[in-house]
Image (cartoon, grey):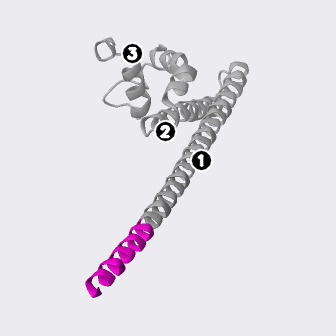
Amino acid sequence: MVTEILTGIAIIVSVIALCVSYHSATKGNELSSTANDLTKSALDMQKMANDMQMAQVEMQIRQLISDARSRFQDKASQLSKEEDNAIMKSIVDSAKEDYLNAYDEACAKYNDGKVDKVRFKKLYHEEIRQLVTDNINIEKYREPGTKYHATLKVFHQWNNLEENS
């Protein structure tokens, strides 16, 4: 009789332990699912923040290039009216350096992965090709003396047919 009571108690304790284990496992799965959802939300928010940061960098690049181009064109226009003015020639050269530096800075951001590479190539492929191959700029981009390494790296990446095939 005592063994039957002890066996009955052992069965009851086992059933209770099984119920507690099941409840704990169910609760653990729910918490795990909630944690996974929160992690996914955090990753989505991080991606959105990264995309916004890239967009901001891209806008800054566009503004930098636009401002440098505008200044260069303005100074070049002034020089055409005062061709004998050595100071004006120096100012135009400085504006041109700023213009080329703007593209080099943009290409450095591209090389560092700080911009959307597909969009950047669509926006700047032709501009950079023209800039580097223009006879007026040929000396600025001649290696090894060039200081526009980022621009040349991007140009060669986009225009080297052997690597792109």
Mark earlier in primary sequence (2, 3): 2
Query: Which callout, 2 or 1, points to the residue nearer the camera?
Result: 1
Amino acid type at image mark 3: Asn
Main secondary-structure element of the magenta-colored stretch? helix
Magenta segment boundaries in residue numbering: 1-21
Residue 109 disc label: 2
Residue at 33% x, 12% y is 161
Image quarter of the C terminus? top left
Mark earlier in primary sequence (2, 1): 1
Are the residues at dot 1 and dot 3 in contact (C-beta closer than 8 Å)? no
Query: Which callout, 1 or 3, points to the residue nearer the camera?
Result: 1
The answer to whether 129 is drawn above or below residue 68 in the figure is above
Q: Position of residue 85 (x, y in %)?
A: 66, 28
Q: Position of residue 25 (x, y in %)?
A: 43, 62
Residue at 71% x, 21% y is 77
| Residue nearest the observer in this picture, 87 or 4 | 4
| Residue nearest the observer in this picture, 146 or 104 | 104
Question: Which residue, given by chain and number where applicable, does mark 3 sit on?
Answer: 159
Q: Position of residue 156 (x, y in %)?
A: 37, 21
Mark earlier in primary sequence (1, 3): 1
Residue most toward the front?
1
| Residue nearest the observer in this picture, 44 or 89 | 44
